[in-house]
């Protein structure tokens, strides 16, 4: 299953309350599609965020976010390279 990255921009900055509401709304929409959240990052100024998921494809992640009415900036799939695994680490 591919890694999917979701990017967020927050204006005004994200509050703990808004994060809790979005997470609660999103959880069942992810579960029903077999999507698993791996980790999330929020910038120190709380204006940008990134979440990493295991998901079948980018469209299923977009559908989950739309169903939950949670906004996002971009969704894209990627390949994870652990330390020492980059193609040029030869």
Image (cartoon, rainbow, N blue to C red):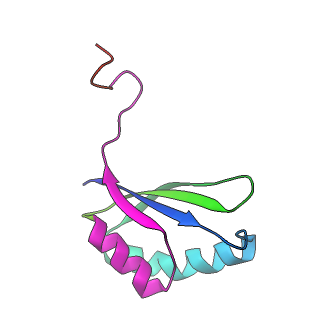
User: What is the x, y in percent for residue 70?
Assistant: 51, 80
- In the picture, the quarter occupied by the C terminus is top left
Q: Is residue 10 left or right of residue 35?
A: right
Which residues are drawn in magenta?
58-85
**Residue 16: percent from left, percent from top:** 74, 70
**Residue 81 covered by magenta stretch:** yes
Residue at 68% x, 77% y is 18
Task: Identify whether 90 is placed above or below 3.
Answer: above
Left or right: 6, with 58 as reference point: right
Q: Residue at x 40, y 74 (%)?
A: 30
Q: Is residue 65 magenta?
A: yes
Q: Quadrant of the N terminus?
A: bottom left
Quarter of image, res 66: bottom left
Q: Check the image and name the residue furthest to the top.
A: 90
Residue 41 image offset from top left, x and y in percent: 59, 53
Residue lying at 63% horizontally and 80% vertically, measured from the top left: 21
Kindly identify the residue that appears in the image at 37 percent across and 21 percent down.
84
Name which quarter of the figure residue 81 lies in: top left
């Amino acid at each position: 299953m591919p890694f999917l990255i979701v990017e967020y921009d927050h204006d005004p900055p994200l509050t703990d309350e808004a994060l809790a509401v979005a997470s609660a709304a999103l959880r069942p929409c992810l579960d029903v599609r077999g999507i698993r959240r791996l980790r999330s990052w929020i910038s120190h100024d709380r204006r940008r965020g990134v979440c990493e998921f295991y998901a079948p494809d980018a469209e299923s992640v977009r559908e989950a976010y739309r169903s939950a009415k949670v906004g996002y900036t971009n969704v894209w799939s990627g390949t994870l390279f652990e330390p020492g695994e980059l193609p040029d680490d030869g």
